[in-house]
Image (tube, rainbow, N blue to C red):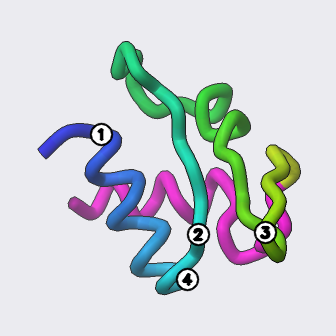
Amino acid sequence: MTNIDKLFIAIETLKPNTPLIFRDEKELGVTEETFKTIEWDIGGSFTTTNPHAELGWTAVKTEMDKL
């Protein structure tokens, strides 16, 4: 299982059915810096400003570490 797989599973665990795009074509790994590049769907448009307080980097990283 890759770190990107873990990222998506962690987000799904914390907030199911959250639409997003993560463009890490080189699979450089998932870090706080790359986490900030996630594009979150907010009603049909996308933003890199995370609108989900429960999906902060610390919470997501904690879930990833469990996998």
- The label nearer to you, 1 versus 3, is 3
The amino acid marked with disc number 4 is: Lys
Farthest-out residue, front: 44
Tell me if residue 58 comes above or below residue 54 in the rendering.
above
Q: Earlier in the sequence, mark 1 or mark 4?
A: 1
Farthest-out residue, bottom: 16
Q: Label 2: which residue?
A: 19
Task: Give residue 52's position: percent from left, percent from top.
Answer: 77, 72
Q: CA distance from mark 1 to mark 2?
A: 18 Å
The amino acid marked with disc number 3 is: Gly
- Mark 2 residue element: loop
Q: CA distance from mark 4 to mark 2?
A: 10 Å
Residue at image coords 39%, 25%: 29
Verify CB contact (< 8 Å) between mark 1 and mark 2: no
Label 2 environment density (alpha carbons within 10 Å; few <14, some 14–19, many ≥20): some
Task: Give residue 37's position: percent from left, percent from top.
Answer: 69, 34
Verify CB contact (< 8 Å) between mark 1 and mark 4: no
Q: Label 3: which residue?
A: 44
Q: CA distance from mark 3 to mark 2?
A: 10 Å
Q: Of residues 52 and 65, which is closer to you in this image? A: 52
Residue 15 circle label: 4
Q: CA distance from mark 1 to mark 3?
A: 27 Å
Q: Label 1: which residue?
A: 3
Q: Which residues, given as a range, are shown in magenta?
A: 50-67
Q: CA distance from mark 1 to mark 4?
A: 18 Å
Number of numbered discs visible in the structure rendering: 4
Q: Of residues 56 and 50, which is closer to you in this image? A: 50
Farthest-out residue, left: 1
- Mark 3 residue element: loop
In the rendered structure, the answer to whether residue 28 lies left or right of residue 60 reads left
